[in-house]
Amino acid sequence: MGASTLESMINKSKVDKYNHHDYYGIDDLLTEDHLLARDAVRDWVKQEVSPIIENYSEKAECPTHLFKGLAEIGAYGPSLPTKYGGGGMDEIAYGIIMQELERGDSGIRSMASVQGSLVMYPIYRYASEEQKMKYLPKLGSGEFIGCFGLTEPDHGSNPAGMVTNIKDDGDAYILNGAKMWITNSPVADLAVVWAKDEEGKIRGMVVESGWKGFSAPEIHGKLSLRASITGELVFEDVRVPKENVFPEIRGLKGPLSCLSKARYGISWGAIGAALDCYDSALRYSQERVQFGKPIGQFQLTQKKLAEMITEITKAQLLAWRLGSLANEGKASPSQISMAKRNNVAMALDIAREARQIHGGMGITNEYPCMRHMMNLETVLTYEGTHDIHLLITGYDVTGLNAFS
Amino acid sequence: MNLLVCISKTPETTAKISFIEDNSKFNTEGVQYIMNPYDEWYALVRAIELKEKHGGKVIAMNVGPASNDIIIRKALAIGADEAVRVDAEPDSSMFVAKQIANYAQENAIDIVFCGKETIDYNGSEVASITAEMLDLPFVSYASKMEFDGTTATIERDIEGGVEVVQVEKPFVLSASKGLAEQRIPNMKGIMMAKRKPLNVVEAVGHDSKSKLLSYTMPQGKQEVKMIDPENMDELVRLLHEEAKVI
C-alpha cells in the first residue's frame, strides 16, 4: 500500500468523519462476519479512498493502485468459493462490502463489482474447470483485472439485438464487433464478452487483452463516475481459442445471471452513497448557524433529514431481506430489479437533498454530496435503467411483457 | 514462543458519553464498541510481526462477557492464532491483572503485550500490576521494539524524549503509537478466524480492594466572549479574574 499511504499523508486535510447510522437496529440482524467485514472495509475506505477520492474524481483519473488494495481486503467475489479466488462468504457480506465501498465512491464500488460479479462470477459459473483455475485465482488476487462486454453502441436496454458475433474457424472462433460503456476496459487484462454464434445464439467467452485485433479505447468526457475508467471493446477478427468459449450456456440468460449478481450488489451499494450524504448533511446541519441557530433546528431542514433516514432505513431493510433470499438461492431477478431501482433512486434523491442542506458548500468538493450525486446519475441507468427495472416489475406482476 | 496480547473493548471514539444511576455507571445505551486501538494497532500487530519472524503463537486474551467475542474474533482475523476469554465482568485493574497473570503463569508466556492505556478509563494500570504479580520486568510506553529471540531493545516515550532499554524475555510491555502499523483484517482473515480456537475460562477469585463511587463530566466549552476594543479594562479584568492567565 506504499503509494496510497503516501497519498493519504499528503491529503491529511480530508478527514473522513463518517459515523455509523443504524436507526432500526439492523445490526442485530447481521452476523459477526457481516459486522467484521463492514468495519474492515469501512476502515479501508477511510484510510485508502476518502483521502484521495475528490482529487482523482476531479482529475477524472482512475486510482488504479486501488485494484490491488481491493484484492487484499477481499472485495473481489467475496461470495464465491475460496478455491476459485473468492472469499467463501454469504450474499449479505457481499452486499455490505459493496455498501461500504460505495460509501466511499460509486466508481470504486464499480471497480470491485465488475471484477467480482461480471467477470469472476460468469467464469466460475460457466467456464470449464481448466479455465476457472487459469483465470479465477489471478482475478481474485488482483493480478488480472477484468471487464464485461455486453452493451453495444446500438444495443443497450435491448442486448438481444447485439451484432457482435463469432464464426467457427477450426480450433478457434473469429470474433468481430464492438462493445460500449465498459467499466475497467482500458486497463483490463481480459474481458468476458458476449457474442452471437452462427446460429444466432448468444455465447460467452474470455478474451485476453493482448490478442491480435483486440483494442479497448477509453471513453473521455464523463461527468459521472470520474474516478472509474470506462472504455470500449473493439474486436477485429480476434481469434478466440475454443476452450475460451463457455461450453454449455446459450442465450441471454448467461449475461443476465451476471447482471442479477451485480444489480444485487448495487442495491446495497447505493445505500452506502446515501448514508455518506446523510451523514455529511446531518453534521453540517448541526455546525452551520444561520439566524442565530444551527440550521438543523429549522423545520424544513429537519424534514429533509427525517425523510432521508426514513428512506435509508426502508432501503436497508429491503436489501437485508433480499440478501436473506439470495442466501437461500431464492432472490428472483424481478425482486433484484425492484431493490436496485428503489435504492438507487432513493440514494440520488438523498444526494440532492443533502446537497441543498450544504448550501453553496454543497457544490464544492469539500463535501461528498455532489460527487455522489453525479456518480448516481450513472448508477441510475447502468445495469438496467431505472425505467427498464420498473417494466421488469410490471411484467412480473401482470404477466404481460411490455418489451415485446 | 508464546506471545500473549491483552485486548480490551472500549467505546468507539465518537460515542456520546453519559452516566446513569446517580453518575455511578456508564450509560451503554446506543454505544458502539471497538477494540482498544493501542491494543489492536500496536500491541497485537507487533506481536504478530514477532511471530511471523521468530515463530510461536499469538494468543489474544480478554476479560469480559460473551458480547466481547466480536472484538476477540477481530483479533483472530488480524492474525492472532488463538484466543482466551475470562468469562467475567471486570471491576478493577487488579482483577484483570490477576486473570492475566494467572493465565501467563500457567501457559509459559514469553512476552505479555498490552496497550499503554484503554481510551475510555485511561488507567494505564493493568500491564504494570500484571508485571508485578508475575515478578517480571515491565517496559511501558514502548514505541519501537527490536527483538532477537531472547533480548529486546525497546524505545520508550518519555517526557520530551526517548529512553532506550534492554530486557530479556520473559517480560511485560505496554505499547504506544509507533510500535507497529495498523493492519485491517481482510475477508480471508475474517473467515479463517471462525476456525481458530476461542477458549472461555472461569475467572480466578479475587477480592476488589477499591470501589468506584461516581463520575463527573468535564465542563462544557464556554462561548467566546467578544470585548469591545475600546474596553481594555474589561479584557484585563476577565483575563485576570475568569481566565486567570494574567
Image (cartoon, coloured by chain):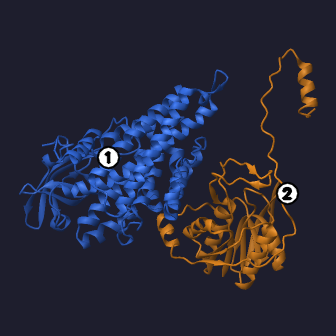
Chain colours: A blue, B orange
Q: Horizontal and vertical percent for residue A280?
A: 55, 38
Q: Which percent across, then down, holds residue A18?
A: 57, 45
Which residue has dot 2 on it? B213
- Quick one: quadrant of the C terminus of chain A? top left
- Alpha-carbon span between mark 1 and mark 2: 55 Å
Task: Decide if residue A312 is in sight here.
Answer: yes
- Disc 2 sits on a residue from what chain? B
According to the picture, the residue beneath numbered tag 1 turns out to be A338
Q: Secondary structure at mark 2?
A: loop
Q: Does residue A171 appear to the left or right of B68 in the view shown? A: left
In percent of the image, x 14 and y 50: which residue is there? A164
Left or right of residue A23, residue A91 in this image: left
Snapshot quadrant of residue A387: top left
Q: Up-down: is B41 above or below A159?
A: below
Tell me the SS state at disc 1: helix
In the rendering, at what x and y percent does residue A10 appear? 58, 45
- Mark 1, residues whose alpha carbon is within 10 Å: few (<14), some, or many (≥20)? many
Instruction: From the top left corner, tell me how far across and down residue A57 is, in percent.
Output: 44, 40
Chain at numbered mark 1: A
Q: Residue at x 65, y 48 (%)?
A: B14
**Dot 1 and dot 2 residues touching (CB under 8 Å):** no
Which residue type does callout 2 highlight?
Leu
From the viewer's side, name the closer residue of A86 and B147.
A86
The foreground one among A403 and A69 is A403
Quarter of the image where one finds residue B34: bottom right
Residue B139 in view (yes/no): no
Identify which residue is drawn at 84% across, 70% down.
B208
Side (left or right) of A365 relative to B126: left
